[in-house]
Image (spheres, rainbow, N blue to C red):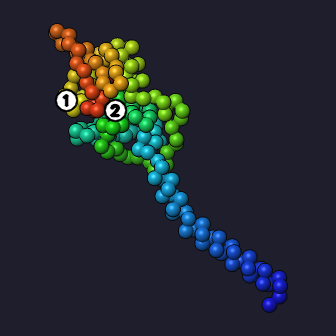
Amino acid sequence: MSWDAVFADLQEQFRAAARREVDEEIPHLAEAELAGIGVADRIRARGGQHLTVQLRDGSRRTGMVQEATPSWLRLADGPRRLLIPLAAVGAAWPLHTAAPEAGPIEKKMSLGHVLRALAQQRLPVLVRAECGEHRGVVARVGADHLDLLEDRGDPQVLTILWQGLLSIESA
């Protein structure tokens, strides 16, 4: 065997080994990439498309995905708008596997930011929580709760903890 043949054979062995290594690495890389994708990212990938979420209480909400952040998502169901804390979601479908990373603004827009904006606008809402359904206007927003000025004959302020929120819907 000539020197050129020896080196050509050696190069082919290296190429074959490199191909095997890449072939073996691809499933691990794909798995590692998927492990880093959160459900909010997968929901965001459905932007402008239909999505159904099943909440912790077993109820379902359906609509077109308008926004999804690490802490909440917003759906449009005809004229109705739904703000859903991500912590209230038990299941969602259909979801894509690939998703864009949240932008810097989306990462910083917490549930508190959105609730404070609703309070400033004094928009009527239907708050669905584990403790029941309540209609009114978000009056104040704290670090872990909101005060709802209820729509009743005798106005009453009800404090609702975020941990029990299922959805806030346009009334």
The residue carrying pointer 1 sits among few (fewer than 14), some (14 to 19) or many (20 or more) residues within 10 Å by Cα, namely few
Answer above or below: position of 11 versus 80.
Answer: below
- The amino acid type found where label 2 is placed reads Ile
Residue 46, percent from left and from top: 44, 41
Q: Decide which of 23, 3 is in the foreground and name it.
A: 3
Residue 22, horizontal then vertical, whole percent: 60, 66
- Look at mark 1 in the image and give the residue it sits on: 131
- Residue at image point 83% right, 85% down: 3
Q: Secondary structure at mark 2?
A: strand
89 versus 161 height, above or below: below
Distance between the alpha carbons at the discs numbered 2 and 1: 16 Å
Occupied quadrant, residue 12: bottom right
Residue, x 31% and y 14% (percent of image)?
A: 139
- 62 with respect to 108 (left or right): left
**Amino acid type, label 1:** Cys
Q: Secondary structure at mark 1?
A: loop
Q: Which residue is mark 2?
A: 84
- Which one is in front, 44 or 109? 109
Q: Position of residue 87 (x, y in %)?
A: 33, 37
In this orientation, does residue 79 appear? no
